[in-house]
Amino acid sequence: MSTGDAAAGAQVGRDPGLQPERTRLAWRRTTLSCTAVAVLAGKQAVHDGITPAGVLAGALSALVWVAFLFVAHRRMRELDRPRPSALSVGRALAGVGCVLALAGFAVAVVR
């Protein structure tokens, strides 16, 4: 191996393959699932008659859905970079919190 080959190999850097694309698709699937839950929660709140509890749960579902969209969009944009940074603990907890809150509000609307 010549010094030219070693220098060329050092410039190539990390080849992430399809891993960022798979992760981006996973974020998109999760966003789609959250969208479906938020829409169904809103539909259920209207279907059972408009009550203050239903309106509150529907509004909170929409708010949490928007917050999750923000977290997911920022992560997907980060994955477009050549060397994406790792997901921070704060953003991971924000995503998990949004999903759990959305599930809780959806259950509240169904009851």
Image (cartoon, rainbow, N blue to C red):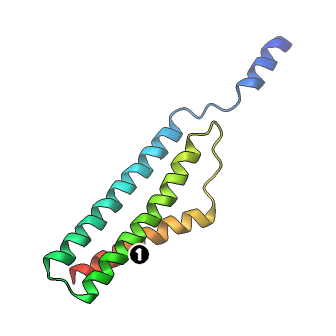
Q: Image quarter for residue 49?
A: bottom left
Pinpoint residue 76: horizontal percent, then vertical percent.
Answer: 51, 48
Residue drawn at point x = 48 percent, y = 55 percent: 72
Q: Residue at x 42, y 70 (%)?
A: 64
Disc 1: which residue = 101
Residue 41: quadrant of the picture: bottom left
The N terminus appears in which quarter of the rendering?
top right
- Residue pictured at 85% horizontal, 14% vertical: 3
> Residue 101 location in percent, x, y?
41, 75
Total numbered labels: 1
- Check disc 1: other Cα within 10 Å, few if <14, some if 14-19, many if 20+: some
The location of residue 14, given as percent across then percent down, is 67, 32
Residue found farthest to the bottom: 52
Identify residue type, mark 1. Answer: Ala
Camera-nearest residue between 111 and 68? 68
Q: Residue at x 71, y 30 (%)?
A: 13
Residue 19 vertical position relative to residue 43 in the rendered view, above or below = above
Q: Residue furthest right?
A: 3
Q: Quadrant of the C terminus?
A: bottom left
Query: Judging from the image, what secondary structure is the residue with disc 1 in?
Result: helix
Asked if 37 appears above or below 32 in the picture, the reply is below
